[in-house]
């Protein structure tokens, strides 16, 4: 098939914020794409390092780069700004420190055009000190109609919970940078990025996309490489004020998305339990932050009030369906069932310390992927 299909264009949106270290590599990997009819939209979100200058210099060398600057507003507002100015027939996102294979966009768009798909996505790798480890693995497949929901949306919703109301063997991760989207889908359903808490905007958008899409193409090739950067904004420990209120708003929004798109009540009922249990772990992580303005006694009381509330008994029923390969979830959910705030807090603290101490250990990461049956693929 021709490299540039019927003159169609791909818009690649890259939010930029203090990303000078890896920015050139990211831009170069995109510009080397075999699918050449692209517009690379670089949006500087109020950086205070040399990011804008780097982007400006690169823009002088390639007319396909469109450079913008805006006051700092975060990745969601930056992505949404990119969506308003994108002129392509296809849309995708790339993070400022990641890499893409030269044939990623070509392969995905070829499949999307051939199968008339709304979305296409690929397997992904994780870059740790320039060494690639597998992150997401998907088999070559084409989904249409109800199978988009049963084989993609429901596994995304439940992930570690192997509930009887669904049947899935392949974990689906909410990263949107592995995807190419039809702009027509975004226009038809007025899709955009949304955030209520912190880093759940990928999850929200992917749920909305899979709830509305009719056809999806999946490629097994590992074509996108996420750089694990402990210094990045997403890896910094924060304390989120009024987390539980924001969680409630997020839950309400997601339930409305699912309900409005005809997802059965039985699925929604079980999903409420699943996301509530994930919220419990987020609450533990939040009060464990060094920035949490709580005494130890206040933290234990916070757990009693916001985790061991009247709804805990019903929500925790789903814990028995957690797959054994999800080590952290299996451990922490089991600990929560003890209903002991002190033990829950301390075990979570220890687990996070171990996780943070081994975050760059590729052997441990590969072992964790193997447990989840996510195997190394050809790169």
Image (cartoon, rainbow, N blue to C red):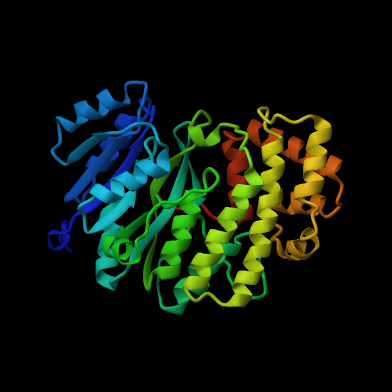
Residue, far top: 49
x and y percent of residue 5 in the render? 16, 61
For image coordinates 56% across by 77% down, the residue present is 264
Residue ID at (67%, 74%) = 164
Is 110 left, or right, of 253 in this rendering? left
- The quarter of the image holding the N terminus is bottom left
From this view, report whether residue 293 is shown above or below residue 81: above
Instruction: Confirm whether residue 259 shows in the render.
Output: yes
Which residue is more in the foreground, 79 or 351?
79
Say if residue 32 shows up in the picture.
no
Q: Measuring from the top left, give residue 310's x and y in whole percent.
A: 80, 59
Residue 156 locus on image (x, y percent): 54, 62
Residue nearest the viewer, comparing 187 with 115:
187
Residue 8 vs residue 28: left or right?
left
- Which residue appears at 46% of the width and 51% of the height? 202
Q: Position of residue 32 (x, y in %)?
A: 23, 42
Identify the residue shown where x is 44% and y is 33%: 130
């Amino acid at each position: 098939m021709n490299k540039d299909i019927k003159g169609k264009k791909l818009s690649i949106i890259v939010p930029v914020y203090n990303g000078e270290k890896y920015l050139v590599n990211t831009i170069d990997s995109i510009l080397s794409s075999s699918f050449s009819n692209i517009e690379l939209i670089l949006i500087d979100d109020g950086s205070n390092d040399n990011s804008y200058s780097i982007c400006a210099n690169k823009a002088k060398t390639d007319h396909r780069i469109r450079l913008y600057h805006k006051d700092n507003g975060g990745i969601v507002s930056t992505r949404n700004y990119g969506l308003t100015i994108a002129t392509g027939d296809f849309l995708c996102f790339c993070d400022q420190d990641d890499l893409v294979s030269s044939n990623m966009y070509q392969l995905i768009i070829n499949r999307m055009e051939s199968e008339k798909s709304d979305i296409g996505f690929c397997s992904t790798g994780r870059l740790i000190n320039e060494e690639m480890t597998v992150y997401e693995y998907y088999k070559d497949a084409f989904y249409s109609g109800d199978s988009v929901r049963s084989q993609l949306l429901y596994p995304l919703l439940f992930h570690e919970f192997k509930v009887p109301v669904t049947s899935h063997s392949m974990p689906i991760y909410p990263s949107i940078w592995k995807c190419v989207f039809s702009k027509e889908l975004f226009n038809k359903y007025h899709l955009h990025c949304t955030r209520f808490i912190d880093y759940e905007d990928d999850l929200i958008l992917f749920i909305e996309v899979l709830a509305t899409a009719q056809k999806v193409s999946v490629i097994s090739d590992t074509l996108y490489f996420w750089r694990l950067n402990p210094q990045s904004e997403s890896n910094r420990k924060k304390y989120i004020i009024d987390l539980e209120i924001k969680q409630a708003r997020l839950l309400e929004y997601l339930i409305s998305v699912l309900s409005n798109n005809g997802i059965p009540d039985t699925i929604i009922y079980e999903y409420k339990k699943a996301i509530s249990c994930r919220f419990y772990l987020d609450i533990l992580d939040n009060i464990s932050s060094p920035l949490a303005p709580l005494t130890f006694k206040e933290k234990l009381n916070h757990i009693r009030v916001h985790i061991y509330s009247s709804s805990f008994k019903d929500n925790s029923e789903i814990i028995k369906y957690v797959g054994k390969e999800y080590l952290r979830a299996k451990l922490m959910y089991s600990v929560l069932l003890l209903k002991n705030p002190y033990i829950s807090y301390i075990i979570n603290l220890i687990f996070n310390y171990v996780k943070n101490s081994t975050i760059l250990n590729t052997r441990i990461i590969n072992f964790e992927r193997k447990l989840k049956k996510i195997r190394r693929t050809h790169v």
